[in-house]
Image (cartoon, rainbow, N blue to C red):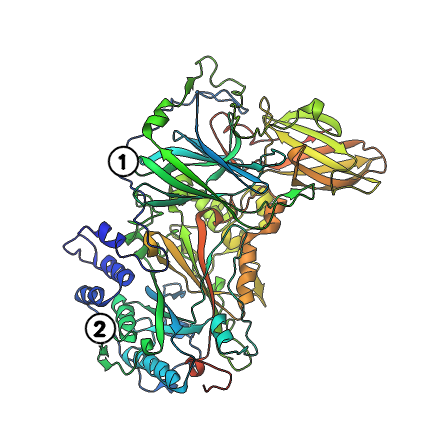
Amino acid sequence: MRRRTFLANTGTAGLAASAGCLGFLETQRASREPPLPEDRPSEPYFPTHVEGMEMVGTATQGRYRCALAYTFPHRFWLVRGSETERVNPRGGEKAHLMVMVWDAETGVVLPGTTPTVELTGPEGETASLSPWEMLSQPMGVHYGDNVVLGPEGRYDVTVSVPPLATRHTTSADYGSDLLEFSFAMRFEQRTLETLSYEDVPSDKEGTPGAVAPMDMAAVTSSQIPERDSFPGTVRGVQRTGGADLLVGTRASVGQFAPESGESYLVASLRTPYNRYAIPAASLTATVERDGETVYDDRLTATLDPEMGPHYGAVVPAERPFDSVTVTVETPPQLARHEGYETAFLDFQPGSF
Amino acid sequence: MLPDERGVSRRAFCKSAVAIGGASALAACLEREDAHVPAGTDDPSTLPERQHAWNESAARDDAGNVLPPRHHVLLHLNLDDSPTASGRETVESALQTLERAYEWSNEGLLFTLGYSPAYFAQVDWSPAGVDLVEPQALSDLEDPVLDTPDTILHLASDHAQVVLAADEGLRGNRDELNGESVEATLTDVFSVADRRTGFVGDGLPADHQDTGGVPDSKPVPEDAPLYMGFESNFEKSQASEDRVTIQSGPLAEGSTQHVSHIDLDLSQWYEQDDRETRVAKMFCPAHAESGAVEGTGENLGTSPQLEDCEEPMDAAREEGVVGHAQKLESVREDGEPLLLRRDFDSTDGGQAGLHFLALQRRLTDFERVREAMNAPDVTEGSAVGRRTNNGIRQYLSVTHRGNYVLPPRSKRALPTEGGDA
């Protein structure tokens, strides 16, 4: 008996013995990505191509709605500080699995949801993964990773979503339990091969811009309001680090700044073109009035049904400010798909 | 290390044998592992009152750090009946058999017998000086199975055959152990509810990469003591045995034990992250920057040398990442860490994992350290997420948690309030 089989058949009790890990034997590369454009700008750029995705389904529990989808294995970039690390698809990886979680009542994509995914394949093989929080031009914020899969067929997929930990402006109850969403995923190479593949013309790829958000009728859009429809008083929008930084104030937002003499300072960091809120950064603000600093501290990542994920703080506001300076202190640490990996890494303070 | 006919190295085979267990695994291991195992003592009074007093009798590395025994078995045991005087005698006799058979050392056998809060509830006893805390989920990302066996036996030795034989002897499957006759068996009193196994020490994780959660590129360094590739038993980041000892009450000189099981995702760790990131996430970003960690980190000596690492929040806000060790560094009392880690890796369930076994004076000490690892203040106040760039949380999934009390040796056999049934 081969040792591998031997071990697999003699797992211990209690810690559920699996039928072995998903096979690493298939080495066919499913990726068909062309080389990266040369001289990529340090801002969002048109990628080399756009691939469609197969929607497995959506499921709802209370305020949480969850979608599962997959496409071809992709290259993507992890971020640590202001450095990126390119991750290439590896042998055995057959799909790029994606999870999106949003508020079923407001439609807002929830930041920092941190799901885990467990798969059981057609032959009882199991795998689990904790996908990375990612940003892509067609899809916005989601969680994803390239996954090793076994044979074609039905996969039972369980996505576990912990309760929202991000501060929010409303009294909405996001619960305190880990929720499980179940999906039946039929994985077939043929399905992957029929997904749309749009080649971006060579004179366009690598130039500043972004491909449009995909039409995701079944799910929600993670786009946030543009300047003209942004609630409250918008002090300005500036381009920094390839992102748009909108800064404004509101007399009060939900539970924040209900007292007179205070207001809610909001910094909305978003992608240009597609208007996705960019989470997982840290920002500070300095507010000056009559030559005095009345606020000099961090802004806290906060969720609001109208403004989406943003960075905010309650600040003293007996009289109007002279100036507000907002600094992106740590670049957004979420992973990037092609077209975003050179952007949002190096920011300048903005005065509003 | 000679390869056997299947091309499996001898040390690898005996590790696998521990995972498999039973008489045939033991027989096969005995054939391959040619070890002289030192005999124990028939005078129990020569042994320490603390069951957890292992360090005096442990091996040490060149720097002087305690080296944990290489092979481990955890047995979950449930009482068949309420404790009786004769049951207590049987348990004590079974354990004394082990002590006669094997030297109290890494070369022989080190072991502890612990009791869960469920046991103490059953015997209706809340001993003073002990915080009997039920196991629970310790972060919002986990939903572990809560282990509640009455009793847990931890067997540890540098020799695979010793933990295998002790396991078999305690179940009544052997008449003798290392030349000593088996006088009594634990299974006369208990039923075995679960058996978990593992290994720690240079080379053992690299020998066991053919399991779930490890990519087939075999990325675990050949000299790593643990799957994640770094040393972790630095003397200065471990509590002393004194520090984890219960101070007062009927179980004074005992300790408490937390045992969790954690699945590891080494694909992301080794194939998506680069080495600098691994150092930043395991230690701190400053160590990644300075190149302080060579190889597995043996060059650091007896301390992870975190003096140049910033406060966790500062690192998170300036570097976008916070290190695992960096987060835990400040959780100390009188300058000393709270936990004495005796964790080991595992292939239980066909998956690369970690049995995280920690001793501490109070079970709430463990919860405090775990909260520092969650770092909710950092995740709220910086770009670091609950998993993203938050130490090694990205790669860990907790599957089981259990809490136990290790009574002092003199009270280790079915302790009750009156000491009698």
Chain letter of mark 1 equals A
Residue on which disc 1 sits: A26
Please tell me whether residue B312 is drawn above or below residue A265 in the rendered image: below
Residue A102 pos. (x, y %) = 57, 36
Q: Is residue B69 visible?
A: no
Q: Is residue A170 visible?
A: yes
Tell me the mark number nearer the camera, choosing from 2 and 1. Answer: 1
- Mark sitting on residue A57: none
Q: Secondary structure at mark 1?
A: loop
Residue plotted at (63% across, 31% down): A269
Read off the residue under disc 2: B36
| Picture coordinates of residue B351, whole percent (x, y) | 34, 51
Label 2: how many residues lie within 10 Å, few (<14), some (14-19) or many (20+)?
A: few
Please tell me whether residue A26 is drawn above or below residue A217 in the rendered image: below
Q: Is residue B370 left or right of residue A296?
A: left
Q: Specify the subunit that label 2 lies on.
A: B
